[in-house]
Image (cartoon, helix red, strand yellow):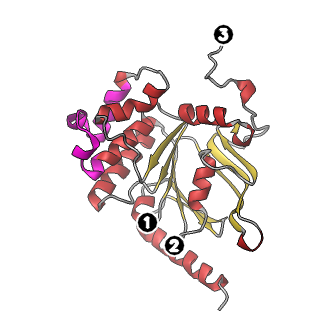
Amino acid sequence: MTEPMDSPSASHFVTSAAVKRAASARAVGAVRVYGRGDTEVRALDGIDVDFAAGEFTAIMGASGSGKSTLLHCLAGLDRLTSGETYIGDVALSRLSDRHLTILRREKVGFIFQSLNLVPTLTALDNIVLPLTIAGRKPDMGRVDEIVQMTGLAGRLRHRPNELSGGQQQRVAAARALLSHPEIVFADEPTGNLDSRSGGELLGFLRHAVDDMGQTIVMVTHDVFAASHADRVIFVSDGRMASEMRSPTTHSLLGAVSGLAEASAERIPA
């Protein structure tokens, strides 16, 4: 059977010769430099990290630490200066812009603080929108599962301006998870939510990992949000500083405080 023109095949993707363990995404020697000369900023300075399949990982760090740059490069939204990032065993630097777009559409889910919902569409239409754009029919059984899990069953015919901020964010999360992507990247997903709505969203993400085998990588500055993860990695000055398993709010507060003190000591008086 002839392969559809818009479906990337193995010939389009360069695979890694040796994947140390099952990983949904990883970075190898990741460097991202902005500007030149006196204005040069090394947002990433040689990061090596992988994100295991079926695991919830949070990335934490101070403003300007490189955490969002790392997420954007892992997701193929930004290009590295040197090094490599992978989705599964696909090397992103080897993809054309067209095939990178296809990969993101088929393998990656996104949850952003800004939501990016279409205001003229209902909640249901927003949830299935990526599949509609790709010309694919949604699995209604999967839709029902996601809708029930997010508690949106009674709000599917409402447009975004008729939903609360927490409900809108759950619509965005449901959209990201609908196609069961290889990995979901979430950039400060609770940043605009009150504590109750944020807790509901985090519970939903935790459920998606535990009961649906989803892989989630979340950038956050919030220790409560990060405490829902299986693992937290800390980024400082574009480098991996440390990591923590089974985090709690108490242990995270101590780690964040320690990073802040270490960073302050490196700043010249």
Residue under the point 48% across and 37% down: 213
Q: Secondary structure at mark 3?
A: loop
* Label 3 – label 2 distance at C-alpha: 53 Å
First in sequence: mark 1 vs mark 3: 3
First in sequence: mark 1 vs mark 2: 1
Give the quarter of the figure containing the C terminus: bottom right
Residue 193 lies left or right of residue 44; in this view the side is: left
Residue 262 lies left or right of residue 42; in this view the side is: left
User: Which residue is denoted by mark 1 in the rendering?
Assistant: 223
Please, is residue 81 above or below residue 129 in the view? below
Query: Badge 1: how crowded within 10 Å, few (<14), some, or many (20+)?
Result: many
The amino acid pointed to by label 2 is: Val
Q: Which residues are magenta?
A: 142-167
User: Which residue is denoted by mark 2 in the rendering?
Assistant: 256
Residue 133 placed where, x, y %? 46, 27
Indicate whether residue 143 is drawn in magenta: yes
Query: Badge 2: how crowded within 10 Å, few (<14), some, or many (20+)?
Result: some
Residue 37, by quadrant, is bottom right
The amino acid pointed to by label 1 is: Val
Q: Nearer the viewer, mark 3 or mark 2?
A: 3
Tag 1 near tag 2, CB within 8 Å: yes
User: Which residue is denoted by mark 3 in the rendering?
Assistant: 2
Residue under the point 36% across and 45% down: 204
Residue 184 lies left or right of residue 127; in this view the side is: right
